Amino acid sequence: MSPPRFFSAALLAAGYLWASPTTSVGMLVILISLPSGARIRLVRGAIEAYGGWVTRLLQSRFVLAGGCSAMTLGHVILGQDLECLARSRDHEHVHVAQYRRWGPFFLPAYFAAAIWLWLRGKNPYWDNPFERAAYDREK
């Protein structure tokens, strides 16, 4: 038996609210990027943005040494282009779900795990449990 429709909607709304501090950072990146030609669209309950300054940000070393094809900030997924978004969509939606679960504690937990791994001589990205969960979803 599935939960009542109202209960499901309330849980969904709570998840959006819980992740909203980081989602607002993603929205700020989008607003700053729109004049440079960035495009946005809604896919599976998340806002995807690509092109313009979004692409330049993801290609820069600011985000990750060597850049990255996509990243998630709450319910905002930033991608270099449509192909990168399509290729990484399942992976990034695992992070969206993690933001719903962890809320404003996601980024501190993510970086704490990365630092802990680095101190133990492991790879802070590839061995990170948040990333491993996302990559496991892709398989």
Image (cartoon, rainbow, N blue to C red):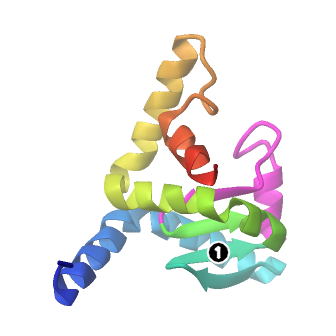
Name which residue lies at 51% across and 57% down.
94
**Displayed quadrant of residue 127:** top right
Judge whether 108 appears above or below 113 on screen: below
Three-letter residue code for mark 1: Glu
Name which residue lies at 64% across and 32% down.
126
**Residue 81 can be seen in this image:** no
Count of numbered labels shown in the rendering: 1
Q: Is 30 included in the stretch rendered in magenta?
A: no
Q: Position of residue 139 (x, y in %)?
A: 64, 49
Depth check, front residue: 56 or 109 = 109
Viewed as shown, does residue 64 lie left or right of 77?
Answer: right
Q: Position of residue 32 (x, y in %)?
A: 68, 73
**Residue 28 can be seen in this image:** yes
Q: What residue range appears in magenta?
A: 51-74
Q: Is 66 included in the stretch rendered in magenta?
A: yes
Viewed as shown, does residue 53 lie left or right of 32?
Answer: right
Name which residue lies at 79% across and 63% down.
84
Name which residue lies at 26% across and 72% down.
14
Question: Most extreme residue toward the front, as rendered?
Answer: 1
Dot 1: what SS?
strand
Q: Which residue is mark 1?
A: 48
